Image (cartoon, rainbow, N blue to C red):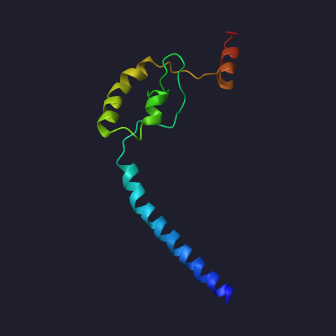
Amino acid sequence: MRPAHNAVGLNRRRLALAALLSHVERTAPSITAAMESPCILVCSIDMKTGYCFGCGRTRDEIAGWIGMTADARRSVMALLPARLETVERRPRRETRRTRMARERDGAV
């Protein structure tokens, strides 16, 4: 009789899990879809300015983005184009392609 009892308990847990997943699928997309973000998945901080190379936000702004109000996010986003102008657009290290081109051109 015990295996049947376990099967009933297992079915209840499966139903509860299915209900939870259904709820998350219904609510999560609406939460995340409504939030604007400047992130372009180039998450690296410029040490001179403290701004992300990809989006222009500071570490604190990135960390607190989800907790910010929509107005606060919009005000930060208004500052980003000017910030990105101050970020140096070059890789942190010399790439192999760049090194080979430099050596080929004789600018060693």
- As drawn, the residue found furthest toward the top would be 107
| Residue nearest the observer in this picture, 100 or 76 | 76
Residue 77 in percent (x, y) is at: 35, 31
63 in relation to 19, above or below: above
Question: Horizontal placement of 87 versus 7: left or right?
Answer: left
Task: Using the image, determine if residue 43 lies above or below residue 105.
Answer: below
Query: Which quadrant does the N terminus fall into?
Result: bottom right
Residue ID at (40%, 55%): 29
Residue situated in front as seen by the camera: 94 or 28:
28
Locate the C terminus by quadrant: top right
Q: Nearer the viewer, residue 72 or 4?
A: 4
Q: Residue at point 53% right, 33% down?
A: 43
Image coordinates for residue 76, horizontal then vertical, percent = 35, 29
Measuring from the top left, give residue 91's x and y in whole percent: 58, 23
Identified at 40% across, 21% down, the residue is: 83
The extreme bottom residue here reads: 1
Q: Is residue 84 left or right of residue 3?
A: left
